[in-house]
Amino acid sequence: MLDAKRFELSRVRTGVPRDSSALPPIVEEKLRIGKPKNTAAGIVGVQKSFSIGLEQAGLKKTLQTMLSVNRFDGYDCPGCAWPDPDNHRSTFEFCENGAKAFATEATNKRVTPDNLMESSVTELSRMTDMELDKMGRITHPMYLREGSEYYEKIDWKDAIEIISSRVRNTNSPDEVVFYTSGRTSNEAAFLWGTLARQIGTNNLPDCSNMCHESSGVALSSSIGIGKGTVKLSCFDEADLILVIGQNPGTNHPRMLTALAGCRENGGSVVSINPLEETAMKRFKHPQKPLHLLGRGAQIADEHLPVRIGGDAALLQGFAKVVLTEGSVDSDFVSSNTKGFDNWQRHINSASWDEIVEQSGISRESIERVGNAIAKSKRMIVCWAMGLTQHKNSVAVIQEISNLLLVGGHFGKPGAGACPVRGHSNVQGDRTVGINHHPSEEFLSACERETGIPMPRKRGYDVVEFIQASLKGEVGVYMALGGNLISAMSDTQRVAEAIRNIGLTVQISTKLNRSHLVTGREALILPCLGRTEIDPGGFVTVENSMGLVHSSKGTLEPASDALLSEPEIVCRIGHGLYPNGPLDWNVYHDHENTRYLISRCIPGFENYNSRVRSKGGFYLPNGPRDGPTWNTPSGKAQFFCHDLPDRKVNDERFIMMTVRSHDQYNTTIYGMDDRYRGIYNARRVVMMNKKDMLEIGVSPGQEVDLTSHWGERKICSERWKVVPYDIPRGNLCSYFPEANVLIPLESTAEGSNTPTSKWIEISISLRS
Ligand SMILES: Nc1nc2c(c(=O)[nH]1)N[C@H]1C(S)=C(S)[C@@H](COP(=O)(O)OP(=O)(O)OC[C@H]3O[C@@H](n4cnc5c(=O)[nH]c(N)nc54)[C@H](O)[C@@H]3O)O[C@H]1N2
Ligand SMILES: Nc1nc2c(c(=O)[nH]1)N[C@H]1C(S)=C(S)[C@@H](COP(=O)(O)OP(=O)(O)OC[C@H]3O[C@@H](n4cnc5c(=O)[nH]c(N)nc54)[C@H](O)[C@@H]3O)O[C@H]1N2
Ligand SMILES: [Mo]
């Protein structure tokens, strides 16, 4: 089954206990602290984009890819889920960070079985995350047998056989778990969900459990759909846009064009964030030459430096102003909503003192912005991880929908809710069934169309999966993309959970820590990236605004041995179920999968033809198109929430974990956070200068951080302090390094999302 020489080699090396590290090594970093930048995405952005591409992928591939990214007939940028203009596209619809995402996939470097075999997994795990990624694209399927320290080459057929036999050997379907990361296409995701359910489980944890789950839960119960309700064109029509808990300059750079568009048309933009992120100050459009000459356009009219976790208070403050001003859209409220009277009483009784204390924003500022909200006829509220990764995230997001409902900001252009999604197809994946508690409607349609009996029992989300695995209740774990070890909270506990599993399988493009901290046996199945030519045809994705469109790669695959994600899923499906009822071999062709989806999911009728129309098609969206409300009462619902208890021990800080400008989630591109003026270092903790003075630390000094959760304490050593303009008592560090400090049990109520933006920390100085 395996190449004999390799088998011998691996046997010789077998028997050493694996000791791979789940945490990236602590390396000497020559931290340089500069000034945060005042302008985002100017010429440096474009030059940098090209140089990144050139360095990793060479001139030909760089040009070829940059000319096809986000074009109507090109590939969807794997960078983020921000939409492209519906009707017109410029020559280059990319941004600096999209360029980095492309370059890391199109790199000329390769991880071959030969070079992987040179090091044990333990040795590889001593490399930094950036070094692992920079090793290049994985070229062949590889196998880490039980007891061995070395990956070896395996062919596809044998790999599939190992998976089939291990799945068959489990005692119950609930011992099998399918993780999904949000870059996966609709086609691959639908097949992945179907395969899980054919095995008999809804164990489909996915990256959105750590991301926008809170938005989905909150909005589904408030407005009857777990998605945003605006289109890109709405940004030109809005008179007010609130951007809360989001850093678009780094994470959704193309959104800046839309915000600038709102301002050009006379609208206002308000930023609500503990940090004044660079992009919210000024913006230079990388594709507009005139922009590049001047100082750039101002983005935010007003910045409110809210305390971490102070948004619920702030939003209730705004609501108080709206009610006091009498700016209720009474017609809208009476014909579309329920619960207004209760909510009005609740808000009227909220205390201004508590609102000001929790939010850290003066009553005067809250009233100023509150007045703008009260006057607004077309308001959009955008948010991302700053709101979704808190204990009370679901409540906070419902405060947003309350505020939108009271002003009647649904069902008209220029207004609505805009949770800005992260991974480029995370929204599509959920739409097509990556869901650990799918609806009965969805399951019965799939049952009817596939002939496969669908399980009804709720499956695990990511936290529940880790908990089950710690108890030894998971036999096989398969991941369609992603890097759960590094992306999840409580890194050491997660590693313990993963090591408890019999077989772990990663379908991946690049090497990461999840290939090194594994189950007793592990497989790496390498797949085509989105930029590459796929023999199954084009695939499709859904962006943050519910538009479904095609994505077609143009580059030659990184290796002949790669398969598309859908084909890998089909091969596993066929290996397990060669005799039907579904003929898995048919779905190597993505057209057939789309046909099946169109039969199972409302809104995808005539999928194959509609997705071929220029720019694709919008999925139905009740609050936007009607407004109509798919809630039990048929109306949108106001929700009342008391302000959370935010008392923490006086000596403790609240820490949020964010992305630097040089990373894509757990993929680290470089060591600089240019916009924030932090260079050559990632193991840093940003702190208010007054707090630094009070505890007696100087810039660059190393401290140890300890997180607190009930009796539990987790310590992480050697973090360099960076003075930063952040509210007092608040800290900021980067993930994935800081994930080790987030206790597994610390999750959001209602969505179970790890509280990556609320970690209680004490600091000790190193002697
Ligand atoms: N280049 C690049 N692009 C990306 C990604 C990437 O890693 N790199 N990741 C993608 C993914 S998966 C996602 S989900 C998105 C993430 O996009 P973002 O949500 O922008 O990502 P974060 O870096 O987590 O930034 C969170 C922001 O919220 C603020 N914040 C933290 N706590 C609070 C709070 O309590 N209240 C308020 N009001 N603000 C708070 C932080 O200061 C920070 O500005 O980006 C996507 N796009
Ligand atoms: N502390 C803290 N933790 C967080 C967050 C935070 O803000 N703070 N954010 C959370 C969020 S919002 C998210 S979305 C998660 C992200 O969690 P994940 O989605 O699990 O992590 P990524 O780092 O995006 O996954 C990167 C890996 O995906 C693989 N990959 C890349 N492209 C492809 C492809 O086309 N196909 C396949 N099959 N594989 C591919 C590569 O091997 C790469 O190493 O992290 C979460 N973790
Ligand atoms: Mo995300």
Image: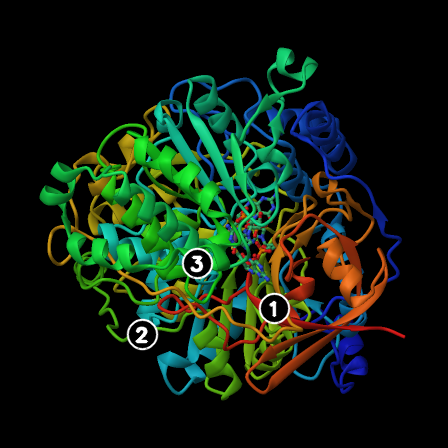
| Residue at x 75% of width, y 38% of height | 56
- The colour scheme applied to this rendered structure is rainbow
Query: Which labelled disc corresponds to residue 353?
Result: 3
- Does the beta carbon at disc 3 come under 8 Å from ligand 1? no
Alpha carbons under labels 1 and 2: distance apart: 25 Å
Say which mark, if any, is on residue 485: 1
Q: From what the image shows, is residue 165 above or below residue 545?
A: below
Q: Nearer the viewer, mark 2 or mark 3?
A: 3
Front one among 326 and 91:
326
CA gap, disc 2 and disc 3: 53 Å
| Amino acid type, label 2 | Gly
Q: Give the secondary structure at mark 2.
A: loop
**Along the line of sight, which residue is nearer the eye, 554 or 162?**
554
Q: Earlier in the sequence, mark 2 or mark 3?
A: 2
Marking on residue 84: none
In the image, residue 749 above or below residue 638: below
Residues packed near mark 1 inside 10 Å, few (<14), some (14 to 19) or many (20 plus)? many
SS class of the residue under badge 3?
A: helix
Q: Which mark sits nearer the N-terminus, 1 or 3? A: 3
Q: Give, as a three-letter code, the residue at label 1.
A: Ile
- Return the residue at label 2: 200
**At 33% across and 70% down in the image, what residue appears?**
202
